[in-house]
Image (cartoon, grey):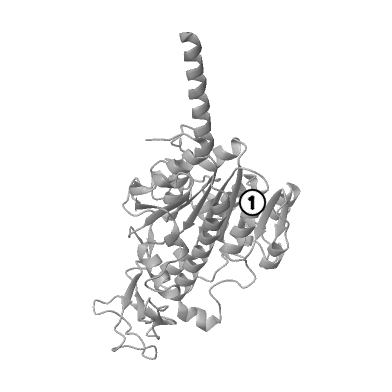
Amino acid sequence: MKTRVLLLLTLFSVLSIAQAEKFQTGSVIFIHPDGTSLSDWNALRILTAGPDSEINWDKLSGIGLYQGHIKNRITASSNAGATIHAYGIKADLDAFGMDNDDIPISLSGKKLSIMQEAKGNGIYTGLINSGSIIEPGTAVFVASETKRSNYDAITKKVIESGTDLIFSGGENWLLPKGVKGKFVESGERKDGLNLIDYAGSKGYKIVYTKYDLASLSPNEEKVLGVFAAEHTFNDLTEEDQQKLNLPNYVETAPTLKEMTDYALKFFANKGKFFLVIEEEGTDNFGNRNNAKGKLDALKRADDAIGSVFDFIKNNSNTLLVTAADSEAGGMEVAGYEIDNLDANTPLPAADPNGSPIDGVNGTSSLPFMSAPDSKGNRFPFGIAWATYGDVTGSVIARAHGLNSERMKGKVDNTFIYRLMYYSLFGKWFE
């Protein structure tokens, strides 16, 4: 009798563990709005929703204070940060999916990034970037190189990775010199490879514009979106954009939300997936001290977050993680009293300490005006800049959906890998 009871208890325990495992693993979406901090999200909220309201980023349930130091510096580079997110280990400033000129052993003990490991376990994979295909925030998940500037090799590895969905700019690195593309008169590859033709031969459906994407069936097996010559945005200062009559973003390219919306439909028809999404404009516009461009990029990132937030309502076995690795430009909101400055009074060129201040069209232009607060008041404000470079800043990591309760308190940058790995594979690394 005792043996039978023990057997029943053992069977019950095994079934309970299996059931728990079933509910703690699922799909993972990592959104990387590069170069963003709490100050950036505050600015977006003030501008688009109002000081007392909320944006999509505010709706996410988990919140962590992101600690972003790397192996040899306090402030991360984009490629070092991406290496940490992809492998779960600290990396040097110049690392691009490498550690001392070798592919690192990830926190799981394998010489594989988390996306490579996911693909090897039959999980569908995707990369979306509003920047070029060479951008490390997505590329490092499938490509390792000794130098970030090895653009030919990085692009080749991204395409050869077999990732099921790849959306980005960067046609110039997909075509060889002398070959005309949709956006470039000549590619820039020195090895003679036409990677767009190669992708087509491997079963990828190729799309080039938001119109192509809007008419594309989500039932395609593999999709490559090539949406610009380089980035899908024009990362110049406001003044240079005006001189050249350039918008913030390429008009024919889909927004990050449109790319994300398609990807969610694409993967929903297939099964468990791991999707990495980067809004690169938030970083590049910040490094140009272009407040108008950065706020536009932040809105695009927030719209994509909103799409995933809505997706999780009906797909609760999905984790959304969002974090930057550093803060671009040290952007801060500078507020002014309504009585002392109205919408028709240009902002001062700089703060008394010398920090430049941007309005709607750059330095010394009219102020931004907030959306109404709870009492209907609107307030003038400017954007003050600390630097052209990246700083450690006040980066906040967020999570929503599956296992998001683990995102709390102070979190190291390696935590992003650990939470994603746990949600994909059910194994937690302390």
* Residue nearer the viewer, 419 or 95: 419
Q: 182 above or below 89?
A: below
The location of residue 376, given as percent across then percent down, is 39, 81
Judge from the rendering whether residue 144 lies leftward or rightward of residue 381; answer left or right: right
Look at label 1 and name its amino acid. Answer: Leu
Residue at x 31% of width, y 78% of height: 335
Q: Which residue is mark 1?
A: 165
The residue at the far left in this view is 353
Residue at x 60% of width, y 46% of height: 125
Judge from the rendering whether residue 133 lies leftward or rightward of residue 80; answer left or right: right
Residue at x 53% of width, y 71% of height: 234
* Residue nearer the viewer, 352 or 45: 45
Q: Quadrant of residue 42?
A: bottom left
In which quadrant of the rendered image does the C terminus lie?
Answer: top left
Q: 367 above or below 27?
A: below
* Residue nearer the viewer, 278 or 230: 278
The location of residue 240, given as percent across then percent down, is 48, 79
